Image (cartoon, rainbow, N blue to C red):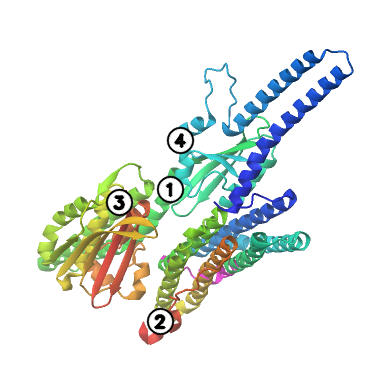
Amino acid sequence: MSEGDERQHDTLSAGALGRLRQNGWLAGVSCVAILAVSVTGQVPAYAAALACLAVLAVAAMTPGRKAETAVQVVRAVPEANPLGPLSAVHLAAAVAEPLVVFDASGAVVHANDAARRAFDGMRAGLSLPLRFRAPEMQSVIEGALAGDGTILSVDYFERLPVERSYRVTASPVGHDTGLYVLVFRDQSEARRIDRMRADFIANASHELRTPLASISGFIETILGPARNDPKAQANFLGIMQEQTGRMSRLIDDLLSLSRLEMKPYLRPGQTVDVKETLEAVISSLAPLMADTGMALDREFGEGSFLVAGDRDELFQVLQNLLENACKYGRSGGRVVVQLEKAISGGVDEVVATIRDFGPGIPEEHIPRITERFYRVDVETSRTQKGTGLGLSIVKHILTRHGGRLSIRSEVGKGSSFAVHLPVA
Amino acid sequence: MPSGHIVSAFEEELQFLSRRLAAMGGQAERLVEQAVAALVNGDPVLAQKVIRDDLLLDEAQREIDDKAISIIARRQPMARDLREIIGSIRITADLERVGDLGKNLAKRVNAVAEGRQPASLFRGLEALAELALAQLKEVLDVFASRSVERIGFVRDRDEEIDAMYTSLFRELLTYMMEDPRNITPCTHLLFCAKNIERIGDHATNIAETIYYMVTGDQMPPERPKEDKSHRVTLNQI
């Protein structure tokens, strides 16, 4: 732990200690007063001693309860309450939304599970104003600390690593406890739907316009100059069929991308066997491989390859990559699929690599090929029935899984796409 | 580990410094975010706001510098405290530059928006900005958590930013060759891309300062340079 956290811890415990000392001091003064009275002779010595003991006993109990409040944060309920000795930690854990309790210095006293999941590095001792730097969050935290006990709320928007938006409420806990609470209400869904609608329309209209223009051109020709030419009509209808096929593939891909954007977090607890998924992908693509005359080599490591995640989504990742390898690496004649375990940055990973021996990707395109509708070569992509969304979907899914895609390619020698996923 | 200072006012001053610095970081992040949004959406109103907001960063820098110098003069800090204060001065300088670069992006909004450009021109710029902003955010998160052992990501990201910048450079040159009318907006966009790439560099500087503040050592010197745009010529495209 670093020194900054240590300091905040210290100010925290110093608060509790201060209260203790205050009580001890009071008890001391009372004892001295009682003794003084007994010395002046009006009260017998044994009575004075008894009185002192009583005062000390009371003093010993009082700070005990105060120290408890520092740990069990919101013990606002009296003992007689049916809630009983319910600790605030339990209460916070039962709240599904991220909830953070902090003290007067802005340091986190307690963060519930949801908060620790939602915000990377959230733990006791972390300084909130340092973590939430957005101007509106700064003002709401400051307002709560300086405030008169009113409840403040603000909309907070995090862009990275995944877009999320929260309605944040800051309020003091109880009366004069020196503790405050921040509650985050997730509004990402609503906001994402809005954005998605705008994005979908922008992307879709742009990409659908080209095939649509071509279809309407051919319709005009069939109705006009080619009215009496069955041969040309058949030819044009074939092209139109191809274009409508392209439009429907595009819509499929756009929809699956939108679905992914709708639910950016994974449900925890699910595990996927990458080896089994990879085998399923290979058999599902067997017809395509037979068509293109590609050979497939498996280089699978020993052991189990379990990762946390959603099977359908990982299936799509591997399918998109293998399909690309078959389509664009066709000239190489074979695809190598590797599965192994590795350690990267201290994290155990499952690495699935799909390698083709086709023309490769020029270096300057590599950083960009996961962008939507980015195409290295528009013509090749069109003839292979690509939509320009495949790798974008791959990247999206991997981000959700805490994984990453690494791409190596050399012109003339082929490309390799490696999927890195943290071990479950 | 030392547990706080005997003079609690000193403690408070140091805390004030890091809080003020974090707030300044938040403002810088917001400013760059809005500058890129203004550029991509061709929004001159937002651009004006960004240009005005840069003053806040200048003000924050002056305030932090004054505070830091007065702490040094009055408390004569040693070791970690001294590094903390010197580090703050260095980080504010970097953040202030980030603000200037953001302001410069905003200033170009009108020139770029003249004669609406196709969205594809901006897509690469957006992706580049996303990388640079992620870099800045993660670095400032490390400043909050002081977990410098994770700081290795900074260099990977730096490489990614440089590769993306080189690619964008080529792309914009291609557009200029296709149609001379593209030269004006594309030149502005080239400067914008350069500015965003510089923002990433400042974030890397901040990471190095934080590493020094926490450990007392300099970050190991290996710094691979992946930006190859200085070698891009016309006949290569």
Q: Earlier in the sequence, mark 3 or mark 1?
A: 1
- The residue that disc 4 covers is A96
Residue A278 appears in view:
yes
Q: Earlier in the sequence, mark 4 or mark 3?
A: 4
Assess whether residue A295 is covered by the magenta stretch: no
Q: Nearer the viewer, residue A14 or A79?
A: A14
Per the image, the residue denoted by label 1 is A192
Query: Is label 4 in contact with label 2 (beta carbons under 8 Å)?
Result: no
Tell me whether marks 2 and 3 sit on the same chain: no
Mark 2 surroundings: few (<14), some (14-19) or many (≥20) residues within 10 A: few
For the residues labelled 3 and 1, the Cα–Cα distance comes to 15 Å
Residue A295 in which image quadrant:
bottom left
Q: Position of residue B145 (x, y in %)?
A: 54, 53
Spatial CA span between label 2 and label 3: 37 Å
| Same chain check for tags 1 and 2 | no
Give the labeled residue for mark 2. B177
**Image: magenta residue range:** B103-119
Q: Nearer the viewer, mark 1 or mark 2?
A: 1
Nearer to us: label 4 or label 3 = 4
Question: In x, y percent, where is residue B134?
Answer: 48, 60
> Which residue appears at 60% of the width and 48% of the height?
A6
Q: Earlier in the sequence, mark 1 or mark 4?
A: 4
Mark 1 secondary-structure assignment: helix
